[in-house]
Image (cartoon, rainbow, N blue to C red):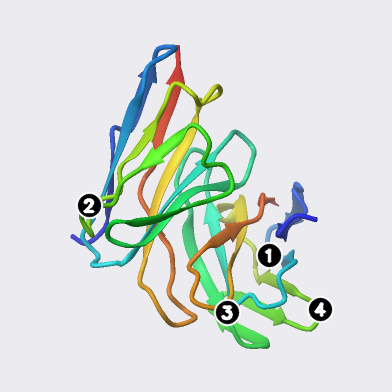
Amino acid sequence: DGGITQSPKYLFRKEGQNVTLSCEQNLNHDAMYWYRQDPGQGLRLIYYSQIVNDFQKGDIAEGYSVSREKKESFPLTVTSAQKNPTAFYLCASSALGGTGNTIYFGEGSWLTVV
Amino acid sequence: QKEVEQNSGPLSVPEGAIASLNCTYSDRGSQSFFWYRQYSGKSPELIMFIYSNGDKEDGRFTAQLNKASQYVSLLIRDSQPSDSATYLCAVRGPGGYQKVTFGTGTKLQVIP
């Protein structure tokens, strides 16, 4: 089935650790995104990428890093510089071009600092 | 001014009524507009999108866009308890950029 797979679904991070969230899509989409959602809040854009080996910072990129070595994959690393990383992380993708290209979401990853 | 603004609610409507959800955006060059539904603890799912001024209907849902007023709305007819969720408005930026910005969402409660 076509879709976006995020893993792990639940992740616990110790203080000072870097952790990486995986995102893979088989929709042949060029654009991929990472959003963060805090309880009762909307989605805030962390990074997005329109093409392999290129990505742009979103509104809250500090403390995060990404790579886009393959079209299908857009992993997000939450570094120790991110002081309050506990949140729900959503990966998404869309086709490029046209006004109606929809963003589709993975099931999300819950990250908790312990 | 936030790029995309929504009233956080909760908006309470009786079962069978029309629910009206509103969203305003700041970038006049924005191209396309999306409504998503999100149940608690789940990822957002697309309801519909609109990019031309006017109304677009899909089943019980109608999206309305007024670019002059920078306003987009979602009407839900014959509201059902299963419609109780948070509704997110999303806006795609102008030009070749693919940045999509979300509002904070409006929580809808449909009372049986």
Residue at image location 52% in from the left, 72% down from the top: B48
Work out which quarter of the rendered image holds the C terminus of chain A and state it: top left
Residue hosting label 2:
A69
In the rendered structure, find residue B16 and report the number of the disc placed on it: 1
| Residue A78: mark in rendering | none
Answer few, some or many: residues within 10 Å of disc 3's Cα (few below 14, many 20 plus, some between 14 and 19): many
Q: Secondary structure at mark 2?
A: loop
Q: Nearer the viewer, residue B94 or B84?
A: B94
The residue depicted at 26 percent of the width and 58 percent of the height is A3
Identify the residue position indicated by label 3 in the image. B50
Q: Are marks 3 and 4 on the same chain?
A: yes
Element marked by disc 3: strand
Q: Which residue is mark 4?
A: B69
Q: Amino acid at mark 4?
A: Ser
Whole-percent x and y of residue B108?
Answer: 68, 52
B106, above or below B22, in the image: above
Circle 1 sits in a helix, a strand or a loop, which is it?
A: loop
Foreground tag (4 vs 2): 2
Q: Give the foreground label among 1 and 4.
A: 4
Q: Earlier in the sequence, mark 3 or mark 4?
A: 3
Quarter holding residue A31: bottom left
